[in-house]
Amino acid sequence: MIFILLANNVSAKIFTNNGNDFSIEQPAGWAVVQEPDGSDQTFTSQTGKAWVRVVVASSEGMTLTEIVGSRKEYLSSIDIYPYSEKDVTISGITGVELIFTEWYNQRDYRETQTIVLSGSKYYILTFGARVNDYTFYSEDFDRILNSFKLPRTDSPAKVANVAPTPVETVKELSASVLLYREKTNVVIGEDVLLKLSVVNLITKPVMMFR
């Protein structure tokens, strides 16, 4: 038995989705179902009796509580009511776990959904199998959940209190000299009054005119 467990661990591999939104350890014998966009991902057991689906979506500014509430409203709209709800921690982030049963195709299925919020995205991990088979696959479910990793999000760069660039500094401290005339239409030989405007923001040295 010990040998079999070691062999399964060696055969397991790390899967990262196309959008690099998450990575998990894919248990030995589990297959990846190709998704059109690559952001959501489904995995099925070798027998096809169990599955794991990871959904990635924009939070659109919602909090985790609002996301969970919206999810529960959706489930109730299709007559599914979670009988268990608790806080969990995955990938170092606090999330919420919902457990419910679903009657589908003349069979009872047990499903567990773990919801986490990270940055501007939220993730829903759904683990499902027939009620009688769920315990058999629980070890694989736990392995996937415990290996779930989110990309590292660096703190946004601060833009406040940024020193002005050298070009901006020179522009602010340079002198401004403007020579202009008020009358724009003149004829040849006519005297024109020119005005000189000088602004000197540099106090040292004093400007001299010659």
Image (tube, rainbow, N blue to C red):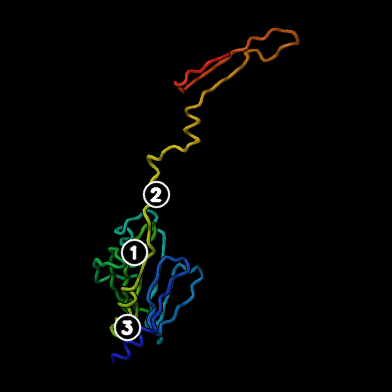
Q: Position of residue 180 (x, y in %)?
A: 61, 16
Label 1 environment density (alpha carbons within 10 Å; few <14, some 14–19, many ≥20): some
- Give the residue drawn at x 41%, y 38%: 163
The amino acid type of the residue labelled 3 equals: Tyr
Q: Secondary structure at mark 3?
A: helix
Q: Position of residue 179 (x, y in %)?
A: 60, 17
Nearest to the observer: residue 187 or residue 102: 187
Which circle marks residue 122 in the picture?
none
Badge 2 marks a residue whose secondary structure is loop
Is label 1 in a helix, a strand or a loop? helix
Q: Position of residue 33 (x, y in %)?
A: 46, 77
Q: Which residue is mark 3?
A: 137
Task: Categorize mark 3 by other alpha carbons within 10 Å: few (<14), some (14-19), many (20+).
Answer: some
Seen from the viewer's position, the closer of residues 56 and 148 is 148
Q: Residue at x 32, y 78 (%)?
A: 143
Amino acid under label 1? Answer: Arg
Q: Earlier in the sequence, mark 3 or mark 1?
A: 1
Foreground mark, 3 or 1? 3
Q: Of residues 3 and 19, which is closer to you in this image?
A: 3
- Above or below, 150 against 155 in this view is below
Please tell me which residue is depicted at 62% across the width and 13% down the height of the picture.
182
